[in-house]
Amino acid sequence: MENTKELRTWLDDMSLPHPLVIAGPCSAETEEQVMRIAHDLKDTDVNFYRAGIWKPRTRPGNFEGVGAIGLNWLKRVKEETGLKTATEVANKAHVDLALEADIDMLWIGARSTVSPFIVQEIADALEGTDKVVLIKNPVNPDLALWLGAVERFYQAGIKKLGVIHRGFSTYEKTKYRNIPEWQMAIELQTRFPDLPLINDPSHITGKRDMVFDVAQTALDLNFDGLMVETHWDPDNAWSDAAQQVTPERLVQMMEDWKIRKVTD
Ligand code: PEP
Ligand code: MN
């Protein structure tokens, strides 16, 4: 990959490259798993290490995340690899713990963005923070909910704000796990041109073989970055096994993606 796009506000302030790459497992599972993947991603073009520690599972009884202990593992990731860290927060208690643990980037999951009450609670808890905050689109294709969440976070004075396009659920039988509805992301970008737009090809596709092409489409559309679920042993991952790629595959993809020139 090469750096070809004019950088935007906080991406620029943080000297982050284009495209921004956020990678790491869907879920933190064990300290060993977290550290192993982080070391595999060290010294690559990955900028932020993601790992979900509180997992919003559709039905009870499945693995629901390791919880707050995972924050210690992410701290270790930062110390040992220099990677910045990222995790999902879904309520005020999560935010307080994540800020205390000095997590660099917090994202709001698709199941939270649908709820104005929870969005407001998280925005209030984050008021004035200088951490990076990314808002995933809501599960359903409702642009107003996504815009409303952005407005709530702006109103809370969050400066390093961005959005993640992770696709939308549908009853239609399609090849995607969540249909991209690219025009929704483009519409959001048109309304908020200064907001970095990140694509999440993992949750859009649900299948690792499709991740490269969806990410390339996003890059062709001038997205600012990618969030790619990455696991050293994807088939045995505790969540989202079918869509995760190995660190080796991610490195190969980062070499092969074509980055659009600013002047194109
Ligand atoms: C995730 O990033 O692992 C996740 C749960 O994503 P989403 O909120 O997009 O479903
Ligand atoms: Mn996931």
Image: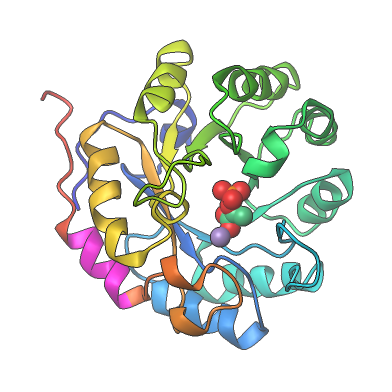
The x, y position of residue 138, in whole percent, is 61, 34
Choose between 102 and 228: the one closer to the eye: 228
Choose between 117 and 62: the one closer to the eye: 62
What residue do we see at 62% from left, 69% from top? 27
Query: From which residue to which does the magenta span run?
Result: 248-255
Indicate whether 31 appears above or below 101: below
Looking at the image, the residue that sits furthest to the right is 93
Choose between 234 and 263: the one closer to the eye: 234
Please tell me in which quadrant of the rendered image residue 263 appears: top left
What residue do we see at 77% from left, 54% from top? 98
Q: If the picture is divided into quarters, which one holds ligand 2?
A: bottom right
Indicate whether 58 appears above or below 238: above
The x, y position of residue 135, in whole percent, is 60, 36
Q: Say whether residue 249 is magenta.
A: yes
The x, y position of residue 181, in whole percent, is 39, 31
The x, y position of residue 149, in whole percent, is 67, 24
